[in-house]
Structure formats: structure tokens, C-alpha cells
Image: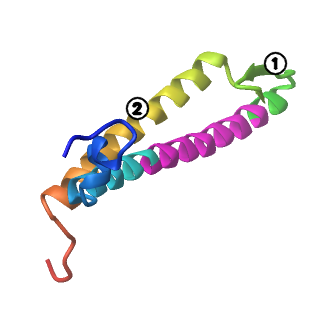
Amino acid sequence: MRTTPFSFGYFPCYNRPKSVIGKKKMKRTIYIILTILLGLLLARIVHGLAEIWLLGEMSSAGELPVAYVFLGMQSYLPPYFSVGLFSFSLIGGYFLGQTWWRIIYIEHRRWRKGK
């Protein structure tokens, strides 16, 4: 039977059942994206705590803080600190996701009670 672009036989994705490899790849992608988001959230918490500390130190010294704008948000920390923390959280979240994916899903290591 000859297939044409207008028949379902022309597209190989319609003839194959969903593979396990595709599901694992999608699961891995979601896992790594969520780990990157976790890194960004933790970086935002660290950024906020650093700003609170800096504002406390500056107010006790009697200085006026200078506000910078980073990604549309006002920040009292220097821009290089914000950029560095943001990029570190992206890169660190990616590599953390890669590492834990390997440990949990490839090596099948688990914590066990009593060891």
C-alpha cells in the first residue's frame, strides 16, 4: 500500500504505540525542569535574606541604600550579585537534577533504615 501525505500511514508516529523510551525522556525532562525551578526558588530566598541583612546593616550605619533593577524587580544588592546568583541557580539546578536522576533512576540507590 502506498502512503501519501494525506493518509495516516505517511506519518510514522501514528502507526507506533507510545514507547517507554519516550515516556522516560519526558519524565527526565520534567524532573530536570522542576529541579531548576527549585534552584531558582532557593536562590530567590537567599537573595531576599541577603537583602534583609544588607538593609539592616545599612540602616544601623545610617546610610541610604541604592536601588537597582534586575529582571523588572527592585533590588538593593549589586547587580553582579543578582546575576551571579541567578545564573548559579540555573546551572546548579540543572546539574543537581542530572545527578539525582542518575542516582535514583539509573543506579537505583535508595536510603534504607538501619544502615
- Residue 37 % position (x, y): 51, 46
- Judge from the rendering whether residue 115 lies leftward or rightward of residue 82; answer left or right: left
In the rendered image, which residue does mark 2 sit on? 91
Q: Overall secondary structure of the magenta stretch?
A: helix
The colour scheme used here is: rainbow
| Secondary element type, mark 1 | loop
Where is residue 7 drawn, in percent x and y?
A: 36, 45
Residue 55 is labelled as: none
Q: Is residue 37 left or right of residue 101?
A: right
Q: Is residue 53 magenta?
A: yes
Give above or below for 108 relative to 35. Answer: below
Q: Is residue 48 above or below residue 27?
A: above
Q: Amino acid at mark 2?
A: Ile
* Total numbered labels: 2
Camera-nearest residue between 64 and 80: 80
Q: Would you say residue 44 sits in the magenta stretch? A: yes
Give the amino acid type for the residue marked by disc 1 in the picture.
Val
Q: Marks 2 and 1, how far apart in space?
A: 28 Å
Name which residue lies at 50% across and 49% down.
38
Residue 51 on image: x %, y %:
71, 35
What is the crowding at mark 1: few (fewer than 14 residues within 10 Å), some, or many (at least 20)?
Answer: few
Task: Tell me the quarter of the picture where residue 62 sits.
Answer: top right
Across and down, in percent, residue 53 comes to: 69, 38
108 shown above or below 48: below
Image side of residue 53 versus residue 24, left or right: right
Find the magenta span and give its range: 34-56
Quarter where residue 55 is shown: top right
